Amino acid sequence: MDLAEVWERARQELKGICSLCRVCDGVVCAGQVPGMGGIGSGAGFQNNVTALARVQLNMRTLHAAARPNLKTSLFGVELSLPVLGAPMAGAGVNFRNRTTEEDMSRWNIIGAYQAGTLGSCGQGPDPRILNAGLAAMAETGGAGIPVIKPTPWEEMAPLIEQVEKAGCTALGMDIDAAGLINMRRAGYEVGPKTADEIARIVSSTKLPFILKGIMTVDEAKRAADAGVAGIVVSNHGGRCLDGTPGTADVLPAIAQAVKGRAKVLMDGGIRSGVDVLKALALGADAVLVGRPIIAAGFGGGVEGVRLLFDHYRDQLETAMILTGCQSIGEIGPHIIYQA
Ligand SMILES: Cc1cc2nc3c(=O)[nH]c(=O)nc-3n(C[C@H](O)[C@H](O)[C@H](O)COP(=O)(O)O)c2cc1C
């Protein structure tokens, strides 16, 4: 199987849900939530892609970085490349039951694991969603990051324990799900958390705790003050709040503000190894990929996802050679072109 076949099959499998556009930029699917799109006008999703596209790189070839080392370490785990699978859930609502939570989780988590990196899973009103993720992580000996919802402490505490017992790499929370009123309607009391509540979660678990959905410097600082191990600069792929800026636009100031205190991950619109390089040059330690992972899963299952990670690794390696970066740590703002 190769990636061309994966995309061809994905196109069939996702007919009427996702067009597998040449560039996955949120234009055709604007407003398709549930589905693959961004909410409302689709601007949050589209801004992610355009913000990255605006970044231009300095091509540099007079150096000795001929065989870059792409490995990096995150939350105590060595990764073969600084790219992770983003949590993706909702086989029923988003994909009209053309797949199952179990399959989606396996594609993401085992595909990433086979590529030498980490996948993740989400949580939803149906307990099967988180359980499917944990079952896939059990196959990898716990490698992966479950990302739970910001629910009241009484509902959250048993889940934290469950994740801890499963021996997962880290625990995440998509705090930007705070406004998902469809969850509330399903009897699921999601909502915002105060910095004190975040600190309580941090101190309740031995696992590194990652807050996903940070878009401002102020909140990044407060998350770091509360002791989180990492943040994900993310607007949930533009699916929570219409009109959010591109994550690549807000990333540099946020990364600068919490440098050395919390790992900074970023997602939204990462579509190639060159995009990975750009995000790292803007200050991210690693990135997450969402929609392309799911499409690759529909097209080729676990192997399709592994092939996608391999493809990003090849592209990133080429881009590192052509910008003179021997290691992930050497990637920095100096490779960004300033007019
Ligand atoms: C269909 C779909 C389902 C998602 N489910 C979740 C989820 O359960 N939990 C979560 O934190 N984020 C979820 N996200 C957001 C992704 O984790 C990620 O932030 C976003 O998709 C990244 O942008 P990209 O798709 O442009 O790479 C979902 C996104 C999509 C498109």
Image (cartoon, grey):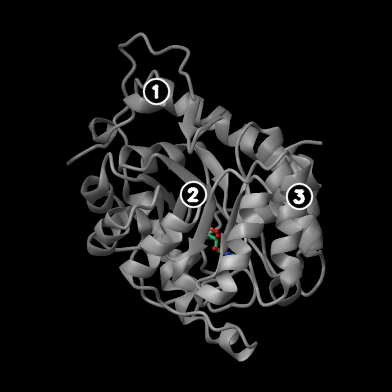
Tell which circle, 1 or 3, labels the residue nearer the N-terminal end. Answer: 3
Can residue 10 be seen? no
Which of the labelled discs sits on residue 136, or is there none?
A: 3
Label 1: which secondary element: loop
Label 2: which secondary element: loop
Q: Amino acid at mark 2?
A: Ile
Label 1 packing within 10 angstroms: few (<14), some (14-19), many (20+): some
Give the tally of numbered discs. 3
Q: Which residue is mark 2?
A: 270
Query: Looking at the image, which residue sits at the far bottom?
Result: 185
Tell which circle, 1 or 2, labels the residue nearer the N-terminal end. Answer: 2
Q: Which residue is mark 1?
A: 322
Can residue 191 be seen? yes
**Whole-number angstrom distance, CA of label 1 to CA of label 2:** 19 Å
Q: Amino acid at mark 3?
A: Ala
Q: Position of residue 87 (x, y in %)?
A: 60, 57
Res 125 quadrant in image:
bottom right
Which of the image's four quarters has the N terminus?
A: top right
